[in-house]
Amino acid sequence: MAPCLLQLNRKKAINMKLNCDLGESFGSWKMGLDDQVMPHINMANIACGFHGGDPDIIATTLTLAKKNNVTVGAHPSYPDLQGFGRRSMALTTSELTNCIQYQIAALEGMAKIQGLTLSYVKPHGALYNDMMANNDVLATIISAVASYPSKLKLMILATNQADKHIQLAKQFNVELVLEAFADRQYTDEGFLVSRKLDGSVHDKPAILAQVKQLLQTGSVTTRSGKQLMLNAHSLCVHGDNNDAIELIKEIKALCD
């Protein structure tokens, strides 16, 4: 699948790649329609076993990624299988570093068996939210990625603090991938509006409108009505059900 071209009112367009959280099933419990999503995305954020995924699920998801020529990334979380990684945990710096690197190593090892190369890391759930809200957590994650033996990128949310985040990552020689969300409403600072608030998760017309705006201007309209430039490199989509698959196809059509 060819990546989207995001026009940012510049002479040169940049690639906007579609990414999706995959491999989050566990045992007999199934999450998402991975086999239907994979042909339509560029980047697969694959669960590493701490919030979803198990050895068989990881292997199957990697096989799908290889078949569809999709870039592979690790999707680590707090060790919270029961809570699907959506609960924050108070880990020390060393505990969080080891937690992340353990999961990266597991996915990279499974990927190597299939002749695949791990390219990036995208934290999941509460870990992702904590990373964006707490500079100490962000620095720990960047350091964990930097000290991992393989050269990996880190995917984080594109916000109005992106320049600072990029400079922090450069101190560790880590390249960031800035992502935007197709289905979520934004604050004026570029953070995702809490799911507890009405309107925080877009319906289909609002999703398509937000994608069009990103493709045309590189911006989103925040909850307060302001225009916010994101300069994102990747767009996160979800493949939880048949309606979501059809929506991804429509987003892809907008990008082509």
Image (tube, rainbow, N blue to C red):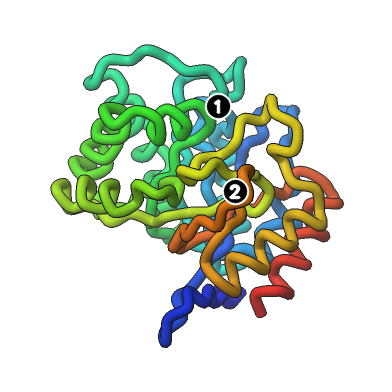
For marks 1 and 2, give the one nearer the viewer.
2
Find disc 2 in the rendering and name its residue: 222
Q: Earlier in the sequence, mark 1 or mark 2?
A: 1
Work out whether residue 86 or residue 54 is closer to the camera in this orientation and state it.
Answer: 86
Identity of the residue drawn at 18% across and 41% down: 147
Q: Of 117 and 253, which appears nearest the observer?
A: 253
Q: Is residue 170 left or right of residue 55?
A: left
The residue singled out by tag 1 in the image is 51
Location of residue 175 (image quadrant): bottom left
From the viewer's perspective, is 21 left or right of 129?
A: right
The picture places residue 256, in percent across and down from the top left corner, at: 66, 80
Q: Position of residue 151 (x, y in %)?
A: 25, 54
With 19 as the anchor, is 95 left or right in this view?
Answer: left
At which x and y percent is residue 50?
50, 26
Q: Are marks 1 and 2 in contact (CB under 8 Å)?
A: no
Determine crowd level at label 1: few under 14, some 14-19, many 20+ residues with C-alpha closer than 10 A.
many
Up-down relation of residue 177 to residue 106 (above or below): below
Which residue is outermost to the left? 171
Up the image or down, 69 lies above or below 196; here it is below
Q: Is residue 213 visible?
A: yes
- State whether residue 110 is above or below residue 136: below
